[in-house]
Image (spheres, coloured by chain):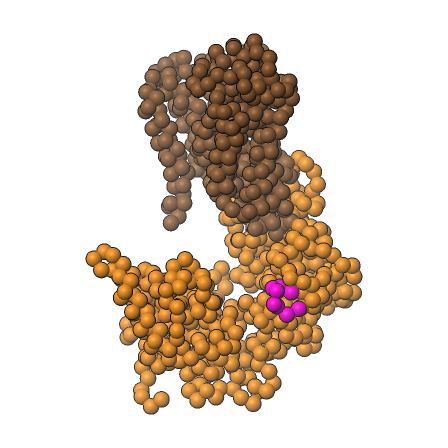
Amino acid sequence: MGEPRRPVIEMNNIVKTFFGVKALDNMTLDLYEGEIHCLVGENGAGKSTLMKVLSGAYKPDSGTMIVDNKKYSRMTAALSRELGINIIYQENILVPWMNVVENIFVGQEMAKGGFSDFKSQFSIAKELCDSLGIELPLNTTIYKLSVAQQQFVKIIKALSTKPSVLIMDEPTSMFNTQDADLVLKMVKRIAKSGVSIIYISHFLKEVKQIADRITVIRDGKPIRTYDNTGKDVVLDKVVSDMVGREASMFYEKDVHTIGEKAFEVKGLKISPDAPEASFFVRKGEILGIAGMVGSGRTEIANAITGASRKYGGKIYYNGEKIVIRNPADSIKNKIAYITEDRQRLGLNLNASIVDNLTMVGLQTRIKKFFVTVRKFIPLVKDIIDGLSIRMRSPMQDVKSLSGGNQQKVVLGKWLFTDSEIFIFDEPTRGIDVNAKSEFYKIMTNLVKEGKSIIMISSDMPEMVSMSDRVIVIRQNRIEKILEKDEISENSIIRYALEVKTDEKAG
Amino acid sequence: MKKPGEQVLTKEKRSYSHIFRDQRMLLLMVIIAIFIVVSIINPNFIGINNLIAIFGQISVGGVLAMAMAMLLLTGVIDLSIGNIMALSGCTMATLIVGNTEGTMSGTAAAGEAAKSMLTSDTGITSIPVAILIGVLVAIACGALNGFIVAKSKCMPLIITLGMSFVYKGLALIITSGRVMAFKLAFEPLRLLRIGGLVPSTLLIFIAVVVASYVIINRTRYGRRLVAIGGNEQNARLSGINVDRYKISIYAIGGLYCAIALIIFASRLDAIKSTSGDNFNMWALVAPIIGGVTFDGGRGSIIGAFLGAFFMGIVQNAMGIMNVSPYIQVMVNGIIIVLAVVLSNLQNIRKQ
């Protein structure tokens, strides 16, 4: 492009800390008028956090933002909107029972003399669709539309506010190739009309296709910005930037012996048309399940443990077939499932630590009819000490604990069972470094005792240093099973993002 | 430096400010305040006879409130418990006195009905069988509610509201809309006074409160109910068969309806299809005033009991002070709204 480029947004030295963990560490980003700037990075690299800072959802600890030559230390949702910044989230924000036009105008309805002005709304919506070259059934109720069409509605809704900056977070993640192409075309058109776009995606191929610039983020820091105006970036380099970490970030795991097959899944289907998944884990082994968020990792764990329905597949424990229809069955078969969403799925926040710790043990270990919660305290003392849960009293409500300690209670609940197979979903998300290494010690002890661990994680150093083998999942399919000596950040990311060797040439 | 985990398991720190944040303590203080004020106005209020009268007034609703409290703690609700009680009673009475003879229409005084019934002898079954069937009907109705709620995954509020009309309709059909008498079947219970003073029905009420407390706090079963109320997803993933527990607690609620009915019958010896209508709300309000939350998992049986007791003394105090019944209705409403708003103050502040 020949014309001089003017930055519409400059974010400088943004720092944002959660529970002592730096999610953003001196992050810097600028955005030019009418460009498509793609952000790439692993899960948890800080992309979404950065966008939430820009849209006013988070207040940064320090740093500045310059928008239209004015300096701000923080945004609010209202201010960011006023400045013409509009964000399209992954989550569905549409009202399913309203039609397309009504949805587009929720919150900015047009009226004539106090009555809704459907005519003007319709014609404006029609204009927007035409300008983007897409066709939408404007008078149809949202829930009748396909996922792709709903995504278009979200984009048009965002455009109806006439933004100068549009942030798109994984807009194509749930699409097939054809629909994804439509979205990409649309994004290009929007940029051509002068809107600047920040585009977040795990799909490096599409990033290469549309980006003017690509910034790689890792551990909350900007690693490098590539110019891609000629659509000729070398994806292999981008991948190495995403994963290059210092050795100090990896955990040293003790070596121990691995035994026989303990647990095996054959032909598991997580939805009627999902590909079949088969894998096993041995005694004393940590099997990592890697993949991008939304690739189907958690769904596999849910299906194994009976938390959600499975559409086929057999499960074997020590060579014997077992039937798991619900979580109770899975617990009976000595499977522990430490869920990812601790507040929603893993804890009873209004109950005490002891109540929570004994919640599963109450089914399997304590088989008395009459119980006194206080008398459980000695029973769980070892677990509380072993996890060093920091608290005032074991009868304290879990709600008042810090995130890391809540996470420990979730784990403790499952340690207070006779489980042999432990499935961890994001075991250390959102907890600080010290708590993390405590978790790793506990996991190592478990496998030393001959128990098996299946670990789902987005944390690459954790995945690489803890796993004995790694399954890489992409779009519900087992893309690759990596043996111990094949495991590296690079190999995992490569399979998770489908950057095969033929891409190496660029 | 303390070792990690060292402060673990030390004795709970005593601070007294939290006591005043506990709705139960507040309620207790309000109750005491009412006692003092009303006793000054009318010294009879504090007498043992009046206390027994208060308990008498709240015993039917109180038992139902215990059922509601346990349901609320499980994260569900039953807006048909009053109607289950009435249906159970109508079934019982119909079996005792028969449907065609010996019943009186409309608003005839219950006592008179009972007397006229003493002579008729047209019952369908014997009294013990009738009582047994009545109790079973109540349990079955509760279990049915639980089954629909658990299996349909619909809002318990709406399901049980609908079922309340089903049960009321059934009671209307059985009794043809008439007042039914129990032929003094429960007269021995009414006359039985422990130590010549305390009515046996009061003891039944207290026994139900104690039983509920033990179930919720001291049994594995109860801990699981509270776990379900606190976080149903978590309970399911922890291996609790949520559906089964929901059905069972509704069934126990049904049993409580039968117990409430027995107290009701011993006090009035007559029942009609609409006798339970007012109890649905009463039984819901008592636990809520006592700090049991509407969305489950939080609150206590003691709180629910205090809530019921509070409602009882307010009603009694207004009676003693000759407050017009019309005003009483409004005062009850104001109390409910005030209690709920006050208990939600913390949440309001948070936002």
In the picture, measured across the screen, residue B122 lies left or right of residue A81, that is right
Residue closest to the eye, A369 or B16: A369
The single residue placed furthest to the left in the displayed view is A113
| Number of on-image labels | 0
> Which residue shows up at 46% across the image and 26% down it?
B274
Chain drawn in brown: B
Residues in magenta, as a range: A269-276
Work out whether A457 lies above or below B64: below
Work out which quarter of the rendered image holds the N terminus of chain A and state it: bottom left
- What is the quadrant of residue B347 in the picture? top left
| Percent of width and height locating residue B80 | 50, 34
Work out whether B272 lies above or below A124: above
> Which residue shows up at 56% across the image and 53% down it?
A345
Residue A219 in view here:
no
| Percent of width and height locating residue B102 | 53, 15
Residue A158 in view here:
yes
- Is A108 one of the magenta-colored residues? no
In the picture, measured across the screen, residue B44 lies left or right of residue A333, that is left
- Chain A, colour shown: orange
| Percent of width and height locating residue A172 | 48, 73
Residue closest to the eye, A190 or A178: A178
Predominant SS of the magenta segment: loop
> Which residue shows up at 64% across the image and 18% down it?
B126
